[in-house]
Image (cartoon, grey):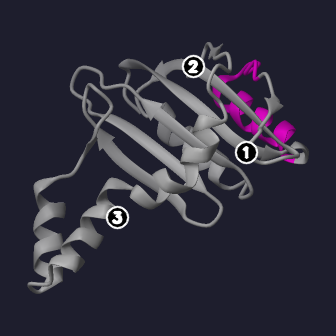
């Protein structure tokens, strides 16, 4: 990881109550302290809970969080990491059915699709416009957005907590 410090947001969109302590422990192992998650019911998935927190730490912390949380399986989450000097921003999305999606983001949080990925879409489509659209949909993470949108909407107005001392 870089020595540059960045910030980001972790949104646990849904987690079974039994996994909430495991989420907490995973984050605490990264921050070497309490993560301060405040769990609230997730209206989009009765019986599930959700939590959000803002964090600050070295560049690469988002990737470490995504790696730790994806092993828990039955949760849905998103992590953003803001750009910092010399480093692009990132977004990770995870659902149990789709797995992890990672994208580079610009300063406004938009997914950036690289020239090579666009070229790959053209080459693999062999002239079929529908295949180009499908490849670009994958590059943008549209399937993850579609699955997570009901959970995002159910979270409007939920307070965000801070995670300090991430290292």
- Tell me which segment is drawn in magenta: 19-37
From the image, tell me which residue sits under label 3: 138
Identify the secondary structure beneath mark 3. helix
Report how far apart the C-alphas of labels 2 and 3 lie in the structure.
27 Å
Q: Image quadrant of residue 4?
A: top left
Report the quarter where the C terminus lies.
top right
From the image, tell me which residue sits under label 2: 54
Could you tell me residue 122's position as x and y percent?
11, 74
Identify the secondary structure beneath mark 2. strand
Q: Image quadrant of residue 110?
A: top left
From the image, tell me which residue sits under label 1: 44
N-term-proximal mark, 3 vs 1: 1
Identify the secondary structure beneath mark 1. loop
Q: Are discs 1 and 2 less than 8 Å apart at CB? A: no
Magenta stretch: dominant SS? helix
Q: Residues within 10 Å of mark 2 (few under 14, many from 20)?
A: some
Image-based side of 105 in relation to 51, left or right: left
Could you tell me residue 138's position as x and y percent?
34, 64
């Amino acid at each position: 990881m870089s020595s540059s410090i960045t910030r980001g947001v972790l949104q646990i969109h849904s987690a079974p109550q039994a996994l909430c302590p495991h989420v907490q422990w995973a984050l605490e192992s990264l921050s070497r302290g309490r993560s301060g998650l405040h769990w609230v019911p997730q209206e989009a998935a009765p019986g599930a809970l959700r939590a959000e927190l803002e964090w600050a730490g070295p560049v690469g912390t988002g990737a470490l969080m995504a790696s730790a949380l994806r092993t828990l399986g039955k949760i849905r989450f998103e992590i953003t990491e803001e750009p910092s000097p010399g480093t692009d921003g990132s977004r990770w999305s995870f659902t149990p059915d789709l797995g992890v999606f990672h994208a580079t983001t610009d300063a406004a949080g938009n997914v950036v699709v690289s020239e090579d990925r666009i070229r790959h879409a053209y080459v693999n489509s062999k002239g079929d416009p529908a295949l180009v659209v499908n490849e670009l949909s994958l590059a943008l993470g549209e399937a993850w957005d579609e699955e997570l949108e009901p959970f995002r909407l159910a979270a409007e107005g939920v307070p965000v907590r801070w995670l300090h001392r991430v290292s």
